[in-house]
Amino acid sequence: MFRRFLAASGLANLGDGIATLAWVWVASTLTRDAALIALVPVALRLPWAIFAIPAGIVADRVDRRRLVIAMDAVRALAFLAAAGALTLRGEGGPAPMEGVSSVPLFVALVLCAMTVGIAEVFRDNAAQTLLPSIVPDQGLERANGRLWTTEALANQLIGPAFGAFLLGAALALPFAFNALAYGAAAILMTRLQGQFHPGTPVEARWRAAFVTAWRYLMGQRLLVLLAVVTGLWNMTFEATLFALVLHAQENLGLSAQEYGFVLTAFALGGALAGLIGDKIALRLGAGRTLRLSLLVSAAMLLLVPLAPNGWLLAATFVVFEMAGITWNIVSVSLRQRMIPDELRGRVNSLYRLLAWGMIPIGIALSGWLIGLAEGWIGRAQALTVPIWVAGGLMLAMAILVQGPLQRGLDQARGRQ
């Protein structure tokens, strides 16, 4: 059963990997204004801040497998609509430095991205919540490792490279392919057999259901700390990733295919971490693994603006992603193990609200910093400012939470 779940996850992540490149790249063909380009990925990630809590309550009320199927179908339709809009537009003119070359197409892209983002909130929360119903408790680290390996290969290795190839052929092709990928993932999930509806009834009133989950989360200091740290990690990473597109295009002169190669470096690091992350945690212990992952991530971010070419940039991201995925394997497994099944959807959504709600802030901050710095230090240097700021914030956080992380783990063990 886990293999079918893994295959569906692989197809969905392949679509995510293609979209990682496609959304921003297509937006950059409509405008060169960093703030306007940022609207598309912000629309994709903003739903995490708005719909995370409703997604958790819904996941504790319905069959989680059916919820995953429905949301994959919605994503397939949204990508199909985006492909249709790009096809109808045809060949466009050069992207202006201010404003957009096609307002209707730009609005359509933003709306499609927001639809995909809303569906992703409900889908990903439900998928992560149902995993403990598929694998035994002692197998969570291994199962999460395999999922992260699959995500790395599909989302970061195959997806960006394939997305770059499709973009080179036609701007609409990545979106059309994604419609097929998410549709296939939904079909695979229909073959999953088992009980995926929470056994304990949820409070009838949404407010009462939310309060129960909030009180539980606030009573778990380790979970709160992990959520805050993950949120700041996501914010700094997304700020870097957004600036990286323009930095790669304008400062390093990388083509879509070359930039896709840089993104595949994430896959190599993620795949390696997925295969050995559980072993690292077993050898070093959860606390030491988490603390070391943060320090390594910070160091790698600070090296990004110093990389003079795509090859060294890729090497930096291999190590960066190894650290990030190892953090995820340990922290997600801890969360799945600590939260009771009847609360898992709601508490997981609150956790991810803190963790993922910072993503649009990072993207918007990156676009704002570029626009602010441009007038002072020039376009080329301004494109690296968000990366330097992100690296500095990551390093400060990594140093400050070293002690609290270990104390939180010790307290959690004492309660067991």
Image: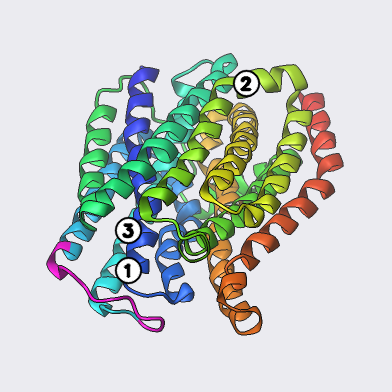
Mark 1 = which residue? 29
Amino acid type at circle 1 is Thr
**CA separation, marks 3 and 2?**
35 Å
Position in image of residue 334 (x %, y %)? 65, 29
Q: Residue at x 63, y 31 (%)?
A: 326
Amino acid type at circle 2 is Asp
Upstream in sequence: badge 2 or badge 1: 1
Mark 2 = which residue? 278
Upstream in sequence: badge 3 or badge 2: 3
Res. 200 visible in picture: no
| Number of the front mark, 1 or 3 | 1
Position in image of residue 277 (x %, y %)? 62, 24
Q: Residues within 10 Å of mark 2 (few under 14, many from 20)?
A: many
Q: Residue at x 50, y 21 (%)?
A: 143
| Vertical relation: 79 (above or below) 105 | above
**CA separation, marks 2 and 1?**
42 Å
411 sits left or right of 386 in the view: right
* Figure quadrant of residue 178: top left
- Quadrant showing the C terminus: top right
Residue 115 numbered tag: 3
| Number of the front mark, 2 or 1 | 1
